[in-house]
Image (cartoon, rainbow, N blue to C red):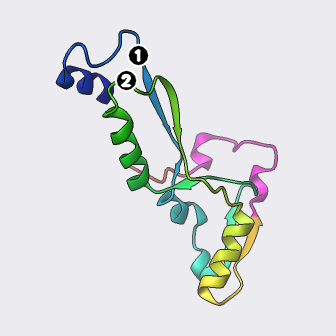
């Protein structure tokens, strides 16, 4: 949508025919706090599994998107917008331990070991309404 609006605003010759830009944003860093749960109270980060994740600030992704969309067709095809680093949850727990001065330990949720929830109601909706 934004790409088409940019093309219309810039004029008919600004974007080459057939050009298509698709922005693929990484995981938003602000959702990390929601995902980690009550780690401040419990001293535990409980997540499905360990592994690298690229957490990116929305402001950084918005700035990159603006630059790409203003390039008048300079980008054609998919563009992945993510942070350069991809820490694991163990590394995030280590950072939280260092920042808080107490031990924050990662814990892997047993429910997710190879089996999906029994029903959709088993997964609470974090955005009700």
Q: Is residue 98 left or right of residue 8?
A: right
Question: Which class describes the residues within 10 Å of circle 1: few (<14), some (14-19), or many (20+)?
Answer: few
Tell me where residue 20 sits by quadrant: top left
Report helix, strand or loop for mark 1.
loop
The mark found on residue 73 in the picture is: 2
What residue is at 33 percent from the left and 41 percent from the top? 66
The mark found on residue 96 in the picture is: none
Q: Quadrant of the N terminus?
A: top left
Question: Which class describes the residues within 10 Å of circle 2: few (<14), some (14-19), or many (20+)?
Answer: many
What residue is shown with label 1? Answer: 19
Q: Which residue in the rendered view is the most extreme toward the right?
A: 114
Q: Which residues are magenta?
A: 108-123
Report helix, strand or loop for mark 2.
loop
Give residue 54's position: percent from left, percent from top. 61, 52
The correct choice, above or below, for 96 with respect to 65 in the image is below
Give residue 19's position: percent from left, percent from top. 41, 16
- On the question of residue 45 being in view, the answer is no
**Could you say which is closer to the camera, residue 41 or residue 129?**
41
The correct choice, above or below, for 11 with respect to 51 in the image is above
Q: Which residue in the rendered view is the most extreme toward the top?
A: 17
Asked whether the beta carbons under mark 2 and mark 1 sit within 8 Å of each other, the answer is yes
- On the question of residue 75 being in view, the answer is yes
């Amino acid at each position: 949508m934004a790409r088409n609006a940019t093309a219309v605003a810039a004029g008919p010759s600004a974007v080459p025919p057939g050009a298509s830009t698709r922005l693929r944003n990484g995981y938003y860093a602000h959702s990390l706090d929601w995902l980690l749960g009550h780690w401040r109270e419990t001293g535990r980060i409980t997540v499905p599994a360990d592994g690298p994740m690229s957490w990116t600030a929305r402001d950084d992704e918005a700035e990159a998107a603006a630059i790409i969309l203003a390039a008048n067709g300079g980008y054609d095809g998919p563009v992945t917008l993510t942070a350069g680093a991809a820490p694991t949850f163990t590394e995030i727990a280590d950072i939280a331990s260092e920042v808080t001065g107490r031990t924050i330990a990662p814990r892997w949720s047993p429910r997710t070991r190879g089996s999906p929830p029994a029903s959709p109601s088993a997964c609470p909706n974090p955005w009700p309404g």
